Amino acid sequence: MADVKVPDVKVPDVKIIVGGGLEDDAAAFVRAWRRAERGGKVNERVLAFESWEGLASVMTGERYRLLRHLHGHPEPSVSALARALGRQYRRVHADVAALEEAGLLDRSEGEVRATADRIRAEIEL
């Protein structure tokens, strides 16, 4: 997965694509570009993973639970998040780092928060 710059504003949806190829990514980029040229909104973020294993290494069950918690309850720190979830700080910190790198949460402005309202997945077979 490529480096992701998390936008400063929360977007409604993050689309996760598993599989597919460069041609699919290029076509999606062109569609978004054309929509922007027509004055349409391009308020979306796409995360692409080469394989199911790649996605599963980022989105574990505990990380999903963490994101769901942060969606409704941003926390002032990773320590506060670990206490709220009843988990070890070390493990929560690792989960936060992985989700932040993927662009699914943000640790700026004095809080830890989810960066989207919804995650949609599209998986190529």
Image (spheres, rainbow, N blue to C red):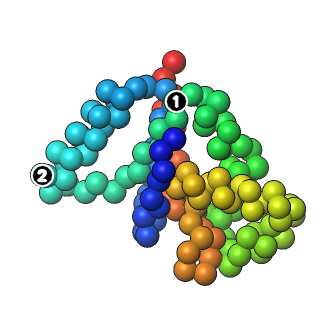
Q: Which residue is mark 2?
A: 38
Inspect the image, locate mark 2, and give the three-letter code of the amino acid beneath it.
Answer: Arg
Left or right: where does residue 93 sit relative to residue 115? Answer: right
In percent of the image, x 74 and y 56: which residue is there?
94
Residue that extends furthest to the bottom in the rendered view of this protein: 110
Measured as percent of width and height from the top left, residue 121 is found at: 51, 37
SS for callout 1: loop
Q: CA distance from mark 2 to mark 1?
A: 31 Å
Q: Quadrant of residue 109?
A: bottom right
Q: Quadrant of residue 39?
A: bottom left
Q: Which residue is mark 1?
A: 50
Category of crowding for the residue at label 1, using alpha-carbon neighbours closer than 10 angstroms: few (below 14), some (14–19), many (at least 20)? some
Category of crowding for the residue at label 2, using alpha-carbon neighbours closer than 10 angstroms: few (below 14), some (14–19), many (at least 20)? few
In percent of the image, x 87 and y 62: which residue is there?
88
Left or right: where does residue 114 sit relative to residue 35? Answer: right
Measured as percent of width and height from the top left, residue 35 is found at: 19, 48
Inspect the image, locate mark 1, and give the three-letter code of the amino acid beneath it.
Answer: Glu
SS for callout 2: loop
Q: Which one is closest to the eye, mark 2 or mark 1?
A: 1
